[in-house]
Amino acid sequence: MLRQMFMLASFSFLIIVALSGCTKKVAKVDLVPVGLPGLSDPPSFCKLVKEGPDKGRLVVTVKNQGNANAPASTTRVEFGFGGSFQLSTPAITAGGFVELPPLSIPATCYNPDCEFKITVDSTNQINESNKENNTASGLCRR
């Protein structure tokens, strides 16, 4: 009887060891909005210059900090006073990022500053490892 219990315990141990080596980490996407580098902490999304085509623009970069490639999605930018805009976001490789076309900041948004909220994967179509980091908020000052 003791011998049978020992054999059963040994066999069970070997099965557990064999199966533990078979587990595979599931690859998932993790999209996050990223601001302009080096401007402030937390990073700013506002690119304010006095003249030229980039005058008063909101620059949004979407990063895929996951370990799987992200399919194309939609990013939404909501201005406090000035409306909401949908931006097509192309597919992003794991660890990669893409800068979306800059948005002109609506003049009606400044009251006196312009508040905004950015939501990546705004239509909730992508199976991500973390949905809690899909938004960023901020304000642009004139």
Image: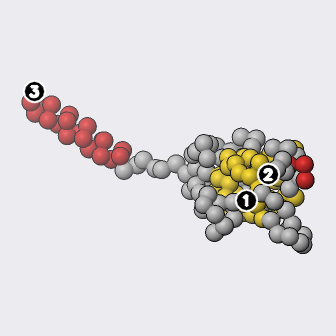
**Which of the two discs, 1 and 2, sits closer to the camera?**
2
| Total numbered labels placed on residues in the image | 3
Q: Are marks 3 and 1 in contact (CB under 8 Å)?
A: no
Q: What whole-number distance in Å separates the C-alpha atoms at marks 3 and 1?
A: 72 Å
Mark 3 or mark 1, earlier in chain: 3
The quarter in which the C terminus is drawn is: bottom right
How far across and down, in percent of the image, does residue 94 sit?
61, 60
Q: Is residue 77 visible?
A: no
| In the image, farthest residue toward the bottom | 52
Please state if 31 lies on the left or on the right of 8 as rendered: right
How far across and down, in percent of the image, does residue 40 sit?
64, 63
Q: Are marks 1 and 2 in contact (CB under 8 Å)?
A: no
Q: Residues within 10 Å of mark 2 (few under 14, many from 20)?
A: some
Q: Are marks 3 and 2 in contact (CB under 8 Å)?
A: no
The image quadrant that residue 49 belongs to is bottom right
Q: Nearer the viewer, residue 85 or 104?
A: 104
**Residue at (26% x, 44% y) in the render:** 14
Q: Nearer the viewer, residue 20 or 66?
A: 66
**Local secondary structure at mark 2:** loop
Q: Residues within 10 Å of mark 3 (few under 14, many from 20)?
A: few
* Badge 2 amino acid: Asp
**Residue at (62% x, 43% y) in the render:** 131
Find disc 3 in the rendering and name its residue. Answer: 1
**Which circle marks residue 113 in the picture?**
2
Find disc 1 in the rendering and name its residue. Answer: 45
Vertical position of residue 90 compared to residue 51: above or below: above
